[in-house]
Image (tube, grey):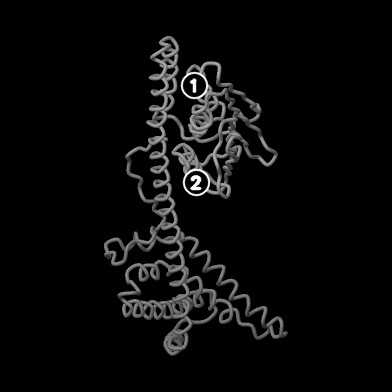
Amino acid sequence: MKIKNQFIPKPNFYPIPPRGVDDFGLLRLMFRDLPIKYIYCILIGIVLGLFLGTRFYWYFLLWGETGNFNWERHFASPFTNQVWWGILVPLVFYAYSKFDWKTQKMWVILASILIALFHEITSYFVWGVFADLFGMEPFDWTQMSKIFKSVPTGFISQWIQYWVIWGLFFGLDYSKKYRDKEVELARIENQLSNAQLEALRLQLQPHFLFNTLNTISSLMEFNIKDSQKIVSKLGNLLRTVLDEDRPSTIPFRDELDFIKNYLDIEQVRFSDRLKITYEIDEKTLEARMPSLILQPLVENAIKHGFAKSSNDGEIKIYSKALNNNNLEIIISDDGIGVEMINGTIPKMGIGLKNVRDRLDLIYKKNYSMKIESSVGNGFSVRILLPFNWFPEQE
């Protein structure tokens, strides 16, 4: 895994500008920055107008009084009212964006009253002009007088509809902020996990290197030729360990190749005393897993199960593709084993702890790591991983 020092911009999911935007950007704010496309606002107004207009017709039809249905009053008036709200939505959005409810309550209420009054008066004029043009009703001073007299009663309805639209913007605003916060928290959590994984990997590299150098040092005194072989193999291993561009997850095939090279070094060290048995299911070779996740387990088998004994020993590496789409890997030895208390090791070494910590960070709860051992009966680590899991973006 390679951590790059680069700035990751904050996702811009929040379309509503900050409060107090100046009037110079009025048109941009009212139209371009609308959280809903302006054409959709108008279409919604038309749909609502058709619905509210035709409901009167169905009401009269239900009671058998269609003769009393007046298209000018019962359909054209509510239709014009809703369409006009669709047209005036940018004005409501401007008031919502301009004044903050927490600090400017009086301005918010005043804006709602003025816009509701403006809608009430202008919608009547729009309806009156169209009614006059299509010969439904004459638009004269008498009609205008009726309009102004009906404003106080119609205003309440328009004021309520204003707050419905305002509430819609508030809901969208809250939703965007909440989603933006979730994205930001996920980004921070991902960066923290990457940093922790990188720390664990940096911890593993010198630990592995020092143990291998100790192996070379012990051989130099009595077998220079084998020491040279180990140095050559160590160079190949270090190219893998120190490769910054190496992906954080690799095929099991590559991880197995690394383990074989590592065990080749250990077999030179212990000569004929160490036997390695591989029982590998061919289906598992392409399964992905964290890079260098198995090396500490193999090292633990040698160091604690075999190196402290003068007897011969065997290490088995087993893999199988399970029917539930899991990958099973078992690394076991027939060494001296350890005493377990309540199913756990009292003092877990750096290698085992490193493996468990990395699996916790990458797979969360989607994995299993079980240790079985007893004094004199060897040591076994069984790991279950999702077979085709890509926990990180490479």
Q: Between 68 and 200, which is closer to the camera in this rendering?
A: 200
Q: Residue at x 59, y 34 (%)?
A: 378
Estimate the x, y position of residue 102 in percent, counting from the top left: 34, 74
Count the marks: how many?
2
Q: Which residue position is annotated with label 1? A: 266
- The dot on residue 184 is none
* In-front residue for pair 62/133: 62
- For the residues labelled 2 and 1, the Cα–Cα distance comes to 27 Å
Q: Quadrant of residue 109?
A: bottom left
Eyeballing the image, is 233 above or below 165? above
Residue at mark 2 = 346
Q: Position of residue 17 (x, y in %)?
A: 34, 61
Nearer to me, 265 or 373: 373
Residue at image point 68% right, 37% down: 322
Figure check: 176 above or below 121: above
Amino acid marked by disc 2: Pro
Crowd class of label 2 (few under 14; some 14 to 19; many from 20; radius 10 Å): few
- Residue that lies at the very extreme toward the bottom in this rendered image: 149
Disc 1 residue crowd, few under 14, some 14–19, many 20+, Cα 10 Å: some
